Structures are given as structure tokens and as C-alpha cells.
Amino acid sequence: MPATQPLPNATILGYPRIGRRRELKRAVEAYWKGDLTEAQLLETAGELRAATRARLVELGLPATGGAIPESFSFYDQVLDATLALGAVPSRFADVAFADDATDLATYFALARGDKDHQPLEMTKWFDTNYHYSVPEIDEKTPFEANATALVAQFAEASEQGIETRPVLVGPVTYLLLAKASDAAGEGFAPIDRLDDVVAVYAELLGALAAAGATWVQLDEPALVSDSLSVSRDEATALVERAYDVLGGLENRPQILLTTPYGDSSASLLRIAALPVEAVHADLVRGTLPHGAFSSGEFESAFYKKQFVAGVIDGRNIWRTDLRIASGVVQDLQLAGIDVVVGTSNNLQHVPHDVNDETKLDARLRSWLAFADQKVEQVAVLARGLRHGADSIEAELAETSAILADRAAAPGVRIDAIRDRVDAVTDADRTRDAEQARRDAQRALDIPAFATTTIGSFPQTTEIRKARAAFTRGEIDQDAYDGFLRAEIERVIRLQEEIGLDVFVHGEAERNDMVQYFAELLDGFAVTENGWVQSYGTRATRPSILWGDVSRPAPMTVAWSAYAQSLTDHLVKGMLTGPVTILAWSFVRDDQPLADTASQVALALRDEIDDLVQAGIRIVQVDEPALRELLPLDADRQAAYLDWSVGAFRLATSGAAADVQIHTHLCYSEFGEIIDAVDGLDADVTSIEAARSRMDVVEPLGDHGYSRGIGPGVYDIHSPRVPSVEEQTELIRIAAARIPGEQLWVNPDCGLKTRGYEETVASLTNLVQAARAVRAEQ
Ligand code: GLN
Ligand code: ZN
């Protein structure tokens, strides 16, 4: 057992690591290009870490005792764990840790791949917009502890006079997020290697203890998810098995076991019984175990153990109601719990600092808390625990006043918008019957195996330059509009040359598929520096949905109508759906998401109306985020699907029978939500399918899916040009399960990240492939 040295009563689970001005992104990308040496990159990273630690102390976290987490990562925290475990997939054996490969070179080789190696796959981290590098494990994956980075960062902090708490993804979550490598035998699951991996964690903990670390944080969000390969109950049993071993080690730091991103109340008492010194629960998404207080079970479970109460929301950008949060932690303390004030999760999902937003409306800004403000809120609550709630009354009164101001501010609640939402009936979410629509849409004269694209054409440097010049005021509205019209005309002519059937306008006017709409809708604000890591060096700047949403003017009609005026081919109107707009924005926390979604849906409904008035016959409403918002907790999924599908239907059901509604969903793994996809009632749905070689057509066939479906035949994630034969083959696989009149032929997703050369070649092949299969029918 380690010596007891309690955690100070204020902490956070992690802090953004990209830098206030995305310094890490710039340094890493410069290193990739060869403009920065490894030594220079390491130095920049060290400076960033030092600045972060100093900032956290300045904001009120104690410099000693392990209150400050060391949550830096060059690219991804799961990849960090892969390196710490030495878990290099066998397909990288020739490059990883080769004689001339440093740890960092190995790290980026796994992250990015090279001409001979596909990178590790990326996938979504729980229900966030963050993506991690998926470990690949098999029976033979060699595990070998590599504590170099963990120990070096701890030592670096000590030199700065700060005693940090190293952070690692825990062993159970690590393996449950991994996939079996291609070399794995039938029936193998990565979690089968739990005992081997725990042995390596034991070595890592030993190395940290030897370096002088008094605390280590192990994150086990697997404990709150129903979306993994094992049930939450099984995950709890696995955690028990792993931490009985880790907790029993002679030589280790004290362990803080965390359960972010959801509700761990069902297993919290079991977790608290483990031989660890502190346990965290997310009290924003989750609750305390029901009835555990009256029975005294909670107090006895946490006897001589610390409880980190995740009361400050790490997923959104609003100031927490400190009075409520203070009540929660004060009650815990009163019940005799050794309570530490914490965040619900790692603050990596929020931007750095509200004070960096100089252009935001001052009143809106006063309601917001980015990472730095959240740390301050944690520190205030901790002070209240030390000196009594009275000692922080001024701060509590201040947040109460801020919340009252927010509730009463103009734009937050607009009667006319609310009345319209209240008046929505089921009829407003219902289109004509499927068959009636099919009959009416015959007039559109769309061939079997119709070819189309998903919407965007390559966003060239010229487009980015023109947009930047317009934003900076170097060119005026007329010049910018003229540029965009010329771009649209070019894309229309190109589609004619390639021979596609149904056209798009190319989306050159859009910086981003959500921000574009956020800028044009009332109720949203956009930030200057509110960057949040999406994956690796990629960051997004989510908009802030703060008020009731309405559409002051048409948003896309001029562009779509112009495109349609140039050609006899049908041009699809192109909108982002309500669920995706919410998923990729910071949403208000003062009303149910379902209500916010209805407001956005009504604005889109009006837009569709206007598009149709302007002569558009097909409207595509993209919902790539539909699955991503699916709650981790199975009990909450039905309610989610109900409102999200309802919002899509509200947006699209104003369309008459002869208007064809399309949707695009991006991913292919939608087995679990196939009923919901059907429920969207779109006439045509396009999805990603090329990489999985049409895996999705079988479940669709079994389901008896009767609407139009466009499984992607061209993988747009790389510049590779798929041949005619290859695409023909994929269409044939689909045609074997689904009638040709239902099938559309399209790429997996939009083309905005591609170059023109490969795009034209690939689409030309796509058209030929469709013609070939049509001829075979
Ligand atoms: N219409 C969008 C595009 O083509 C869809 C993007 C997406 O699904 N992420 O870019
Ligand atoms: Zn997509």
C-alpha cells in the first residue's frame, strides 16, 4: 500500500492540450513537414506543458499533492497508452522502434501511417466529437512497459515545482476500445489479454512510484457505456479483476479511478470497494447511487477513501450553477465523505479561455465558462468546502445573478418561436405515403443506378483564399459572390462532362457544414479562438447555440437556384440536418435538446419550402451525426431516437410528394439504428460503404428496406482512384441484394478534402461503372 497523502480537494480530470492558439498543431505539422526538428518539437511541447501547469496553479489548483493532472498528448491519449504498453501492431513491426526510430517517430508512424502502412483506424471516443486511434490487438501483440514519456513529464513538472498526477486510459477501457487485429484468430477479443495488459500497467505504476508520483489517474469510461462489446455489468467485473491486482501492488502511486461521460451510479459502490484510494463519478451526466445515502452504504463504501465529485460540466461551455453544485458537495462532506471537487470529464472537449473571445457579445460572454473558467469554478467550490459555504456566498450570488440574467436576456426565449413549436402536431412530421411519393416522383425521370455525389466538390486553395480575403474585407460582397457563381458554374459544367445524373452545386460557399448555417441563423454565436481538438492536429470551432433559433432570411436558396438555372439536370438542394447542427455545436443546457431541435427543424423546413419555390426538386438533408449523439446508456436511446428522428421529419415533412428528400449518414455501422434510419422516411439515403465492401446491403436487404439507398462505391478518405472494375464490383454486390431502381451510385461522402485530379478520374470511373451495371440488367 502506498503512503497516504490525500488528494487536495480541487482537481480536474484533464485540460486542453492543443494550446490557446493551437500552438501544438502548428508545431506538430511543421515537424511532419520537416520544418521543425524532433528536438525543437519536444521543446515546444515542454513549453506548452509548463505554461499549462503554471496556468492551472494561477487559476486556483494546488501545485502540490497531485491536484494537477498531466494530460498532455501529442496526438491522442489512447495512442499514448499504446506506446506506454509497447502494443505495436505486428503490421508495424518493421518501422516501430526500429533502430533509427525514436519513440516519437514510432508514435506518429502509428498515427499517420506511411506509403507502406495504413494508419491506425480512428473512431469516436464515447459520445464526443473526439476521435482516438484504435489499438489493434491479437494473441501475439507484444506488451512491454515504456514509461519514458510518463516519467519524463512527471520529472519535468517536479523541476517546475509542481507535483502532477499522471493520467492514463485504464486497462479495461483500453482493451474494450481496441479491435482484434487482422492477424487475430477466430473468436479472439482484445479483452482476452486483460491479465497481460494489467501486468504492464503494474510495471508502469512501479516506474511512476519510483519517480516519486504520489497519485496516478486511470480513466475507465467503459464503466458507463452500453455501446461496447461487453455489458456495463461485465465491464465492472473486469475492472474488479484488474484493480484487485493493481491495487494490491506493493509499489505504486495512489490510484484515482475515474468514470467520466456517463452514469456510473449502478456500479459506484462496487468500484469504491476496490483497493484504490479515490474514485470519481460524473455527476453531470450521472447521479449518486440511488438511496445509498439513507442506507449509509455510500458512507461506508467511501470510508477512508476519497470521492471526486464531477460537478462541473466538462462537455459544455456554460457557467455551472454554483449554488446547486455547492449544495451537492457540501452535503457529501456533511455526510462524512472525504470529497474532492472535480469536473465531469477531461476538459479537452472545451476551448481554453473565454477571455480570448474579444468579439463575442459581452453579455453572452458573461454566461460562458471555457476550461479556465471551469477550473476557477472548481477552486471556488473547494474553498467553500474548506471554509464553509458562507465563505463563497459572494461567488454563489454572482453565478445566480449571471444565470438569472441569461434566463431573462432578449433572444433566449422568443414567444413567437415557442408558440410555433408548441403548435407542432404529428401531421407536421408526416409526409404522404411512400408509394404515393414514389408515383409522384416518377416525373423526375431518374434512371435506375442514378449517379450523384454527396454535395461538396474539392475546396481548393483559391476558394479558401477568396473566403479569407472576403472575411478580412479585402474583397467586397459583389466580388465574392461573383467568385462563388463562377465556381458553381465550373462545377456544373464539370458534372456535365463527367456524365453524372443528379447534380450538386459544390458547396464552395461553406466554410463548414454546421458553422455556415450557424452564421445565418439567429440564436447562434461563433467564436474566434474556441478551438476543440477533433483528432490529432485537427480542431474545430463549434458554434454556440444560446437562444431561440429562427431564420431571418433564406440561407442556401440563391446558390442552389443559380446552379439549377445553369442546367437541365436536377440539382440537389443541400442542407445540414437539425441533429447534426446540434451535435457539432455547443448547445444550450436550459431546455431539453428535443425542444432546441424542433426550433432548428422549423427553420430548415422553411428553407426547404423556399428551395422548392425556387424550382429545386430534390433536397438532401445531411445527418452524419445521427448515430454519434446516441446515448451510451441503453435506457436513454429510445427517447433520443424518438426526438432526433422527429426533428428530421419535422424539417422535411413540409415537402410535397413530388419533392424528393435525400439524407446522408456518413458511417456504415448503423445496424443498431436501422429502424431509426427507416423512421427518417427519407426517399433516398446515402451512406459510407466502400471500405466495408458493402457490408450494409445485407442488413438492409434483410430489413426489407424499400426506399432509395446509395451505398458509397468510392472511398473518399484517400487520394486513391478506384477503378471502373472495382466500383462495378461493388455496385454488383449491392444489386444482388437491392433492386436497381432503389439503388443510387455515389461516393462515400463529400469531396471537399480531395483534389480535383483524383476526383475527376474517380467520378468518371464511377459513371462508367454505373453504366456497365445498368447494361447488365
Ligand atoms: N454534403 C456534405 C458534403 O458533401 C456532407 C458532409 C458529411 O457528411 N460530413 O461535404
Ligand atoms: Zn459523409
Image: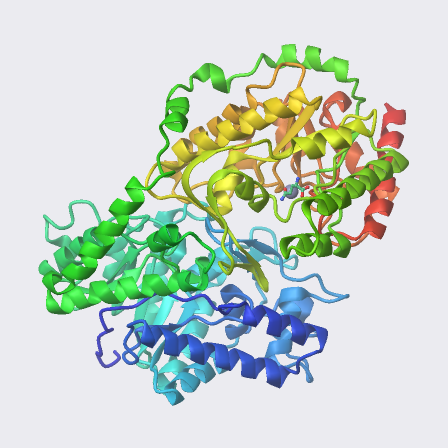
Viewer-proximal residue, 387 or 225? 387
Is residue 142 shown to the viewer in this render? no
Q: Quadrant of the C terminus?
A: top right
Q: Is residue 171 left or right of residue 435?
A: left
Residue 389 at x, y percent in the picture: 12, 61
Residue at point 36%, 78% (across, down): 164
Viewer-proximal residue, 69 or 326? 326
What colour scheme was applied to this rendering of the protein? rainbow
Is residue 600 shown to the viewer in this render? yes
Q: Is residue 21 left or right of residue 589?
A: right
Q: From this view, report whether residue 307 is shown above or below residue 637.
A: below
Q: Is residue 306 left or right of residue 555?
A: left
Q: Splitting the image into four quadrants, where does ligand 1 fall?
A: top right
Residue at point 30%, 65% (across, down): 376
Q: In the current view of this chain or complex, which residue is farthest to the bottom?
A: 159
Displayed quadrant of residue 738: top right
Q: From this view, report whether residue 669 is shown above or below residue 235.
A: above
Q: Quadrant of the N terminus?
A: bottom left
Residue 686 at x, y percent in the picture: 67, 34
Q: Is residue 456 left or right of residue 44?
A: right
Residue at point 70%, 10% (across, down): 439
Viewer-proximal residue, 130 or 673? 130
Displayed quadrant of residue 371: bottom left
Number of disc labels: 0
Residue 41 at x, y percent in the picture: 59, 80
Residue at point 55%, 80% (across, down): 44
Residue 511 at x, y percent in the picture: 64, 49
Displayed quadrant of residue 636: top left
Q: From this view, report whether residue 377 is shown above or below residue 108.
A: above
